[in-house]
Image (spheres, rainbow, N blue to C red):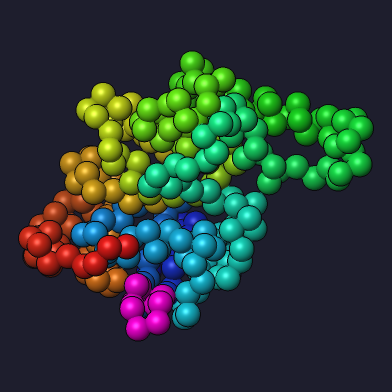
Amino acid sequence: MKDDSKSILRVNNVNLHFGAIVSLKDIQFDTEKGKILSIIGPNGAGKTSVINCITGYYQPQNGNIFFKGNDVTGFPPHKIAQMGISRTFQNPTTYPSMTALEILLAARFIHTRSNLFENLIHFGRSRREEIASRRKVEEIISFTHIEDLRKKPLGMLSYGQRKQVDIARALTMEPELLLLDEPMSGLDDVMKEVMTELIANINRRGATIILIEHDIQFVMGISDSVMVLNFGEKIAEGTPEEVSRDNKVMEAYLGKSGTEK
C-alpha cells in the first residue's frame, strides 16, 4: 500500500458476490492523487464491478473504500458524487430527447442548495446557483469541444459524440476522482485520438483518473499504473512496462477469460 498522504482512494480487501457467483475477491489497491490508474482484464474479470462499488451502485459484502481518508463504504451514489467522485458509463443512456446542454445542466443539481420555494420564485440563492451552474457548464462545453453539440438531442448524436457528452457531464459535477468505463470502446480512429487528447487534458488539469479499457495500446501509453483483474481477483499491478511483462497477465489474455461482467 502507498503512503496515505499521496492516495486519494484506497480500496481495502473488497469482496463482492451475487449468490454463489464471486465477482470480486479481496481486491485491494490505492489510487495516487493526480495520476491515471488503468484497470484491465478479460471480459468478466470484475472491472466494472470495482467502479460500481466505488460509486455506490454495488454494496460489497466485505472490505472498505476510503476517499480522501473518509470511509465511504455503503454510501449511496448521490452522496458519493457530492463528495467528489463522478463516472461515465460504457453505454451512455441518458434520455435521448435531452440536449447536451440540458444533460450538463441537470448534472449540476448535486451542487445546488436552494429549496422548492426559492426555485419557484427564481430569486436570491436559486438565481445565483443557476448563474454559477451555467457558467460552469459553458466552461466544460468549451473544454471538451462540444460547442456544436450543445443544442442537439442525445438521440441524434453518434456513439462517439454521446461518449464526449457523457465525459462532459461527469466533469460538470467537478470531480476530484473521475472513473471512465471503456471510453474507447466502439470508437473509430479519429474519435480515439479526440478521446485520448481529452483524457490527457483532464489529467493535466489535476483530476485523478481510474480507467477501465480494453485498448491495451492506449492504456500502456497514457497510464501511470495498471492493475490487472481476472475472475474477480487481482493478478498483477505496477507500471505499464512491469505489467506487460507479467506471465500471469499474458496467460489471462490468451483466452483464459471469465464470464461476462
Residue located 37% across and 59% down the image = 48
Queried whether the magenta region covers residue 17, the answer comes back as yes
Residue located 58% across and 31% down the image = 98
Q: Name, please, the residue furthest toward the bottom.
A: 20
Quarter of the rendering occupied by the C terminus: bottom left
Asked whether 241 or 156 is in front, the reply is 156
- Residue 243 percent across, percent down from the top left: 18, 57
Asked whether 152 or 197 is in front, the reply is 152
Residue located 56% across and 31% down the image = 97
Residue located 65% across and 33% down the image = 105
Q: Is residue 238 visible?
A: no
Asked whether 85 or 149 is in front, the reply is 149
Quarter of the rendering occupied by the N terminus: bottom left
Q: Name, please, the residue furthest toward the top.
A: 148
Q: Tell me if residue 189 comes above or below residue 207 in the rendering.
A: above
On the picture, is 219 further left or further right than 99? Answer: left
On the picture, is 115 further left or further right than 247? Answer: right
State the extent of the magenta-drawn residues as a range.
Answer: 15-25
- Residue 87 percent across, percent down from the top left: 48, 48
On the picture, is 163 further left or further right than 147? Answer: left
Q: Report how many numbered discs are placed on residues in the image.
A: 0
Q: Is residue 146 visible?
A: yes
Asked whether 119 or 168 is in front, the reply is 119
- Residue 38 percent across, percent down from the top left: 31, 52
For the stretch drawn in magenta, the main secondary structure is strand
Q: Tell me if residue 178 comes above or below residue 198 in the rendering.
A: below
Queried whether the magenta region covers residue 207, the answer comes back as no
Quadrant of the image occupied by residue 79: bottom right
